Amino acid sequence: MTRKVRVRFAPSPTGPLHIGGVRTALYNYLFARQNGGDMILRIEDTDQTRFVPGAEAYIIEALDWLGIKFDEGVHIGGPYGPYRQSDRKPMYRQYAEQLLRDGWAYYAFDTAEALDAKRKEYESQKRTFQYDCTTRGEMENSLSLPADEVERRLASGAPYVVRFRFPADTEITVHDLIRGDVTMNSNLLDDKVLFKSDGMPTYHLANIVDDHTMEISHVIRGEEWLPSAPLHVMLYKAFGWEDTMPQFAHLPLLLKPEGNGKLSKRDGDRLGFPVFPLDWHDPKSGELSSGYREKGYLPEAVVNILALLGWNPGTEQEILSMDELIKQFNIEHISKSGAKFNVEKAKWFNHEYLQMRSDEEIAKMFEPQLQAHHVQAPHDYVVKVCGMMKERINFPSELWDTCCYFFEAPTDYDPAAIKKRWKAGMTTHMAKVIEILNTVPFDYEAIHKALLDDYIVGNQLNMGQVMNSLRLAVVGKTVGPDMLTLVMTIGKEETIRRVQRAIDTIGEVE
Ligand code: GLU
């Protein structure tokens, strides 16, 4: 019988979720959906010293915004709960005790000072101290101390940790779905702490116990966890759970846009793009880290961008909806090497997804900007302008600058454009524009014929100069959509008002 696919996203609430973490959640989600499996949100908060208030709520909100949905989790419950490790605390002790009983773990009593002194001693000999099979004999633990002394210490309530006991000189192989077999010798691995006398497990113990008891079938997580994987494989062996050990897939790192090194928060600040899904206000420093949502990225664009950072469909197709991603995603096409973040490409994706939104939706995004500029315009007019202008923007925040002249007459005129376009005789030509608008039916074709064909071409005038001067009068600059479409949109009266004002303000030039 094949096993039901059950995957988990297991963040630690130590701050805002990095987009690398979002990508991990996304890949888990795609894999779960594709295989009719379950997607679980588990909060790994065993390290209370790194706990950050608000981080858990942030993670939930961010994934919800992106449409990454869960079947079970800390926020919705489920049959394998609780889903927050601090709420599962009482269940871990029995597993630590099982390992101790079976000789896979031992008590260690070394104080922080003793460990520090040991590290210094090694440093002075130009060596690096690691608590492992070669050094554990020099330390104070249940392997080096007499049994009655261990008993006495435990009975007296002396603080301890439980460490994993790696067997000496053993090859440990992790089978990774992306990298194949990764083998490490146990001599290189330290006896990691699994449990502390305050009853709290560490990440390693809690993670394995939870994956086992939650019947997780696949562990899809960041490459930074690959060095921990041999310990995890050994823990499955030690518990006797090898038969149901999940399959592992370690995802490549997200790299800085210019090449090597992991993408960091500072890269985002430096290069002007977010590395977090949502704005994050650090509760301690008050510092703001910007998010994709507040920058104006659409969630479906972010999903598409992240999906292609480290995976490709094996075709040229770049625009992939969540449903298409669910159909096409496969672990075999995940790359082994790091994926470089490309800011320009990210903007392009957002542009493409904005075009797929209705004019009505774009108008809704534009509303706060209109309000900020105290503009009151008929809704249909706003929708029409948004429909015309959306192809020119990458982000909704660019709308006002791109199309403010649809709502406000210019108050000044670009001096360089005046110099270049507003030549001698231009006030006469502009007066003619007003005359045509006043006499010809207000209709695109009719005005085109009267102004462009009959007047400009008929009199062998410079088309660029006259039309760009008209543009200057209406817009204030020589930018914008097709000139007559613009005139038709803002209307006859408004066009005439603007042209008259330009004649009065700029006047005749020599
Ligand atoms: N809590 C770990 C993290 O924050 C989870 C690692 C794993 O998925 O095993 O990334």
Image: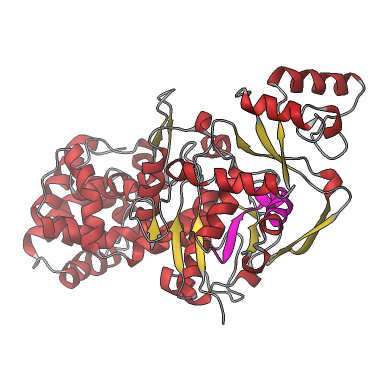
Tell me which residue sits at (25%, 51%) in the image: 365
Q: Quadrant of the C terminus?
A: top left
Tell me which residue sits at (75%, 23%) in the image: 115
Compared with residue 180, is residue 58 higher up or lower down, i.e. above or below? above
Residue 118: quadrant of the picture: top right
Q: Nearer the viewer, residue 35 or 421?
A: 35
**Most extreme residue toward the right, as rendered?**
125
Residue 237 position within the rendered picture, expressed as x and y whole percent measured from the top left: 71, 59
Residue 371: quadrant of the picture: top left
Q: Is residue 10 visible?
A: yes
Residue 263: quadrant of the picture: top right
**Most extreme residue toward the bottom, as rendered?**
1
Q: Could you tell me what secondary structure mostly forms the magenta stretch?
A: helix
Q: Nearer the viewer, residue 162 or 5?
A: 162
Q: Is residue 245 left or right of residue 144?
A: left
Q: Nearer the viewer, residue 194 or 178?
A: 194
Q: Nearer the viewer, residue 21 or 340?
A: 21
Residue 38 position within the rendered picture, expressed as x and y whole percent measured from the top left: 44, 67
Compared with residue 320, is residue 20 higher up or lower down, i.e. above or below? above
Question: Is 223 colored magenta in this rendering?
Answer: yes
Residue 243 position within the rendered picture, expressed as x and y whole percent measured from the top left: 66, 69
Compared with residue 15, is residue 216 higher up or lower down, i.e. above or below? below
User: What's the magenta region?
Assistant: 216-235
